[in-house]
Each structure stands twice: as C-alpha cells, then as structure tokens.
Amino acid sequence: MSGLEDDTVGGFNAMLAEHRDGPGEAIVSTLIFNDHTRVLHDRMDVRSVEPLTRNEYRCSGCTALLDAVGGAIDHVDLVQRVQPAGYEADKVLFIITTDGMENASSRYSYREVKRLIERQREKGWEFIFIGANIDVAREAERLGIDRDCAVGYVHDEVGTNVMYRAASCAARMVRCSEPLEAGVWRRELDEDVHRRGR
C-alpha cells in the first residue's frame, strides 16, 4: 500500500483498538507480504497485540498474494487440527487486503488456493477480499471467495481508512456471531467507491 503507509498503520491500529475493547476473546494473526510473507502476530490475544509501527510496515517488492494466503490458511488449519478438543477457534475470519495484482508467488497457484479456501469454507471459515487497483470480482472468483465478500476500495488516504473500518465491522460481526451480511460490513466501502471511485 505504497504511498499510504501512515494511513495503513493508522487504520490497522484503529481496528485493533476497537477490538481490544470488544466482547469476548479474539485471537489475531497478521501477515504482511510483498514478494515475501512476514508474520507480525501469530495467534495473539487482541488485547496483547502492540500497535503496528512504521518500522514494521514497509512497502516494497512485488505481490505474492497466493503464497501469503495459501501459507496462512495451511498454518491456521494445522493449528486448529492440533488443538485439544474444545480449544479450537469457534470462528475463523480471513481478511485479505491488497493494493495490487498477484505477480510473485512461487509456492501456491490459484487452483491450490481456491481449493484451500473452498475446503475451509465448508468448515465454516469466512473469507473477505478487499482490493484496490485490480479487478476485485475476478480475483475473488479465482480465489473461491463469494462476490458478496469481495469489494474494491479507493486507493487513497480516505479509502484506506474506509477499508479498515469495513474490515473492523466484518470482524465485529463474526465476533458477535452475526451473519456476515455484505449490505452491512461493506456498505461504506461501496458508497465511497460509488461516490469517489477511480
């Protein structure tokens, strides 16, 4: 999210702050990726996640979207399978955000990631895909993510903040066991793209 690093850090931290004060437990994993994937938080209680800093968040390189998503799904699935009975996550939500096209993955293909997502959706996992500068509907279809769970955003300061508010709304809905209704969590994004879209 080159050129919008401060807005990305601020939006992410605002989302964390909202969920720190939310009801119940929320376990967070955060990955950032360019041509490599870096894990910032691995299954941490949201209340203990430190705010993201500009030192931790730097934009560079290409977009290895498939490697990031595929690796994260495989990791979370493994963790879920080795948990003692009763300790698995009740709900799993993947929020995938990108501002560019896949162009650097070497470990996972679209077919493999789509298969992983479809398998995990059968287990009740939720996936949302929020992108800029790409054909979001086409990418979502290639990934096996429902169109209602895929939305574009305006790639600027305002759009980045709207994107994080929408992601936070989706997370709040899942935490509260509400259905992930597109008309609710993505409404502000859709309105912003309609009003200012580029």
Image (cartoon, rainbow, N blue to C red):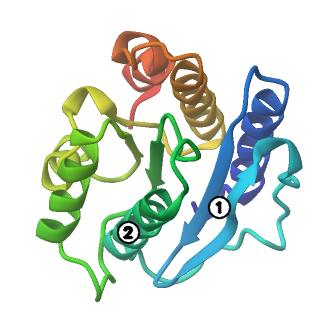
> 114 or 140: which is nearer to us?
114
Q: Position of residue 148 (x, y in %)?
A: 26, 26
Residue at image mark 1: 3
Side of 145 where 157 appears, left or right = right
Residue 194: image quadrant is top left
Amino acid at pointer 2: Asp
Residue at image mark 2: 74
Identify the residue at image location x=78%, y=54%.
6
Side of 165 where 187 appears, left or right = left
> Helix, strand, or loop for circle 1?
loop
> Helix, strand, or loop for circle 2?
helix
- Quadrant where the image shows the N terminus: bottom right
Identify the residue at image location x=41%, y=48%.
132
Let me know if residue 167 appears in the view: yes
> 146 or 7: which is nearer to us?
146
Residue 17: image quadrant is top right
Q: Position of residue 7 (x, y in %)?
A: 73, 47
Q: Position of residue 180 (x, y in %)?
A: 40, 20
Q: Position of residue 120 (x, y in %)?
A: 28, 49
Q: Residue furthest front?
A: 85
Residue 114: image quadrant is bottom left
- Quadrant where the image shows the C terminus: top left
Q: Say whether marks 1 and 2 touch (CB < 8 Å).
A: no
